[in-house]
């Protein structure tokens, strides 16, 4: 396989942009391209590594917040059950203080127990 570089043929490299696809010619092969990227400068590497670090920190923070959210959803479900039970018990206590009595005319009367 023949891959062009600056040492092999500098005219060919000058005709191509550094990020362009460079054809690779083998005996009997055609329409096959390989990608050539020039080496990155030191500043680019520093910036990319910083961005990756920040992205990883944000991803970790997202995972922590998801776990916290799941925990809060579970606590919310428990709280709703407790409130429902308390309201039900309160209704039972209030209703237990009343009794239904039949009056002589056939109408039911609700009286509060003393």
Image: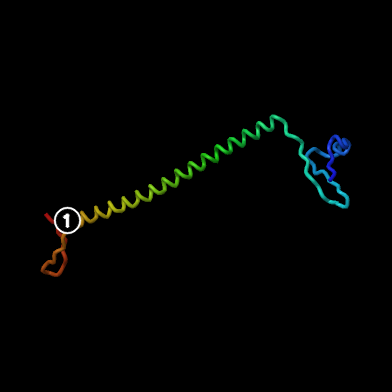
Q: Horizontal placement of 2 versus 101: left or right?
A: right
Query: In the picture provided, is 40 more to the left or to the right than 50?
Result: right
Q: How is the image coloured?
A: rainbow
Residue underneath mark 1: 97
Residue 104 screen position, x and y as percent: 10, 68
- Expressed as whole percent of the image width and height from the top left, the position of residue 83 reads 31, 50
Q: Is residue 62 above or below residue 77?
A: above
Looking at the image, the residue that sits furthest to the bottom is 106
The quarter holding residue 46 reads top right
User: In what element is the residue under mark 1?
Assistant: loop
Q: Residue at x 42, y 46 (%)?
A: 71
Is 94 situated left or right of 70 in this image?
A: left
Question: What percent of the width, then of the height, locates residue 107?
Answer: 16, 67
Q: Quadrant of the C terminus?
A: bottom left
Q: Residue at x 86, y 48 (%)?
A: 26
How many other residues sit within 10 Å of disc 1, few (<14), some (14-19) or many (≥20)?
few
- Residue drawn 86% across the image and 47% down it: 25
Residue 54, x across and y down, in percent: 58, 35
Tell me what residue is drawn at x 65 percent, y 35 percent: 48
Which quadrant holds residue 7?
A: top right
Q: Nearer the viewer, residue 11 or 9?
A: 9
């Amino acid at each position: 396989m023949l891959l062009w570089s600056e040492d092999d043929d500098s005219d060919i490299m000058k005709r191509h942009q550094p990020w362009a696809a460079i054809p690779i010619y083998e005996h009997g092969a055609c329409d096959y391209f390989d990608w050539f990227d020039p080496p990155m400068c030191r500043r680019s590497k520093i910036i990319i590594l910083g961005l990756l670090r920040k992205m990883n920190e944000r991803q970790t923070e997202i995972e922590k917040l998801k776990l916290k959210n799941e925990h809060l959803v579970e606590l919310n479900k428990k709280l709703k059950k407790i409130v429902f039970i308390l309201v039900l018990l309160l209704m039972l206590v209030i209703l237990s203080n009343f009794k239904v009595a039949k009056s002589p005319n056939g109408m039911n009367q609700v009286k509060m127990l003393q």
